[in-house]
Amino acid sequence: METNKALFNYCLRLADDSLILGHRLSEMCSKAPVIEEDLALTNIALDHIGRAQAILNYAGVVEGKGRTEDDIAYRREEREYQNHLITEQENGDFAHVIARQLYISLFESLLYAELEKSKDQTIAAIASKTIKEIKYHLIHATDWTIRLGDGTEESHTRMQKALNDLWMYTGELFEMDEMDLLMAKLGIGADLTPMKIQWEQQLANILSEATLKVPADSYMQTGGRSGMHTESLGHILSEMQYLQRTFPDAKW
């Protein structure tokens, strides 16, 4: 695979995860259980969208076709998005929002720690900035997981159900195809294989403290990286792309 094309798609994958999750979290604005949490989730959403903007801007430079971050974010078809399936899942109740964030933030804390060492200076710089945000995201998700898991019978039951429901999307986080392998070999991307053991160990420790169990179901969903998505992504894109489709080339 051509290195430049692989780098462009690697950037898309990183950015799409943040872009789609940021949009999902933005839907929680005014819907969180308390106002402080409403502000916290909104800020996390902004962190993700800001990260997506930075990476998509670089993707446009790598591509060299004059496309801006907005062009790439809003003018692609559904099959062209390469985000992990877990990022597009509907929010559900508050426990689902926290479970999704725990799985993703724990993964990102490991991923971006490796990307800080990237031989690509732009990716390394973005990773260095974003790892500080991810540390907060992980603390936030961990605290709420423990609070809900070790809380009332109702909160414990809901948190365990959320973890179980989303578990099938976690295996995809550590899949590596030809492009991922090339980026890792060149020292640009990260090798995800050793991260899985660390992720599982850290997750087990958090859930143990929360009096929750690591889901046992071994069935995993996949396809996001190759453009095969759940119907949830289509609903997100219909909202995200509405203005661009209604008023193409509009300028503020």
Image: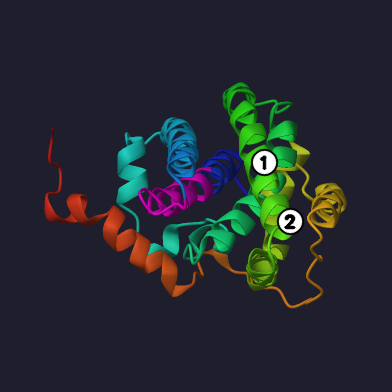
Which residue is found at the position 86% from the left and 51% from the top? Answer: 205
The quarter holding residue 150 reads bottom right
Q: Is residue 29 left or right of residue 187?
A: left
**Image: magenta residue range:** 15-33
Give the residue type that dot 1 points to: Leu
Percent across and percent down for residue 130 are 59, 29
Residue 176 shows in the view? no
Residue 100 among those drawn in magenta: no
Q: Which residue is mark 1?
A: 138
Q: Is residue 233 left or right of residue 201?
A: left
127, 95: nearer the viewer: 95
**Callout 2 secondary element:** helix
- Depicted 164 relative to depicted 212: above or below: below
Residue 135 shows in the view? yes
Residue 24 among those drawn in magenta: yes
Residue 4 marker? none
Q: Main secondary structure of the magenta part?
A: helix
56, 127: nearer the viewer: 127
Q: Is residue 174 left or right of residue 125?
A: right
Which residue is found at the position 81% from the left and 66% from the top? Answer: 213
- Depicted 221 relative to depicted 67: above or below: below
Mark 2 neighbour density, 10 Å: few (under 14) some (14–19) many (20 or more): some
Residue 174 marker? 2
137, 94: nearer the viewer: 94
**Callout 1 secondary element:** helix
Percent across and percent down for residue 222 are 63, 70
Q: Nearer the viewer, mark 2 or mark 1?
A: 1
Which residue is found at the position 83% from the left and 48% from the top? Answer: 202
